[in-house]
Amino acid sequence: MPAMKTIAILIPVFNHIAFTRKCIQKLDQLLAHRSFNNCNYRVIVIDDGSTDGTSEWLNERHPEVVVLQGNGELWWSGGINMGAEYAISELGVDYLLLWNNDIEPASDYFSQIDELLKSLGDQTIAGSKILYDDQDQKNVIWSFGGFFNPKNGSKSMLAYNKPDSPEYDRPIEVDWLAGMGTLVPVNIVQEIGWWDADTFPQYHGDSDFTFRAKTAGYRICSFPQLKLWNDKTSSGLKHGGTLKGLSRALTDRRSNSNLKDNFRFYKRHSSSVLAYRALIAYYIIYFGGFCKWKLLSLFGVKKEK
């Protein structure tokens, strides 16, 4: 009989204790007092300097959870690295499961991972089907993995904003995965290195890591049976229709539109200068949309949220 595999669930957090409470309670509901045939789980929360009592609540209510303390400057990639290093060196785990405190798994999520481990092996990074945790969009996909073309610069998320359908009920090989519900064999980390916290502290840390794994010859695959719902209300930074907000969206680490981070991703992974045309086109559309709604607002027309 194959040896049981240990999976460390890594959850980087900074404040938002309400999300963390809900997340841990859900994990406890799905994992506690349950036995799996092929794996067992350890939960690790990386608290990057929360001031809302997150660590205190965890230590008091959930002593089974490992709580690691950051200095407030880890951001996402640094938090994942801290959790991964502890899980590998201190717990000797076989897999790392990247998690967020604002996602909710399907009731059979961990049973599906247990079944998947029978055939997954250690050459594949497995991704989840991530849907919106919104009453009106429960069946709408946010991400099912993504693609990047180093030659023409095209970067996209598979099935983004599309209704879930039979088309997405099969495993699909992709180029990169989001940083939630992503199962990473430890041997891949040991070969390609950690998440790049210096270059991509927040956004693109996930896509950079998985794309590096892809170019190193590993399989990156999204599995439809691994379903998650993501609450997007606490994620990212939008410009909000103001010039000050636009400036922040282009420079703040919490923004997916950060100019430096996007340029760095293309600089690292593009194989042709022509790839930058896609990045330029993205910002033309981004600026165009801002100007369009700014102009329309002068006539009392507001964008629907």
Image (cartoon, rainbow, N blue to C red):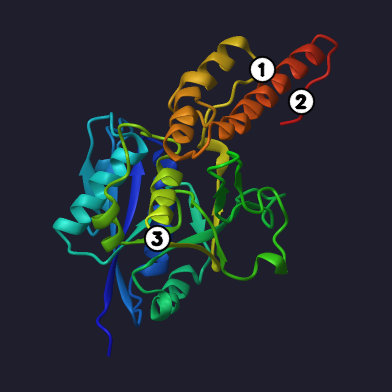
How far apart, in angstroms, are the residues tagged by discs 2 and 3? Answer: 44 Å
Q: Nearer the viewer, residue 28 or 194?
A: 194
218 over 1 or under it: above or below: above
Query: Where on the picture, by quarter, is residue 232?
Result: top right
Q: Quadrant of the C terminus?
A: top right
Q: Could you say which disc has been placed on residue 303 in the image?
A: 2
Amino acid, disc 2: Lys
Residue neighbourhood size for the residue with mark 1, other residues' Cα within 10 Å, grouped as few (<14), some (14–19), many (≥20):
some
For label 3, count other residues whose C-alpha is less than 10 Å away and answer few (under 14), some (14-19) or many (20+). Answer: few
Q: Nearer the viewer, mark 1 or mark 3?
A: 3
Q: Residue at x 57, y 35 (%)?
A: 275
Residue displayed at 64% across by 69% down: 169
Reading the image, the residue beneath label 1 is 241
Q: Please name the residue that numbered disc 3 is placed on.
A: 217
Q: CA distance from mark 1 to mark 2?
A: 9 Å
Q: Amino acid at mark 1?
A: Gly
The image position of residue 70, as x and y in percent, is: 23, 36
The answer to whether residue 57 of the structure is visible from this angle is no
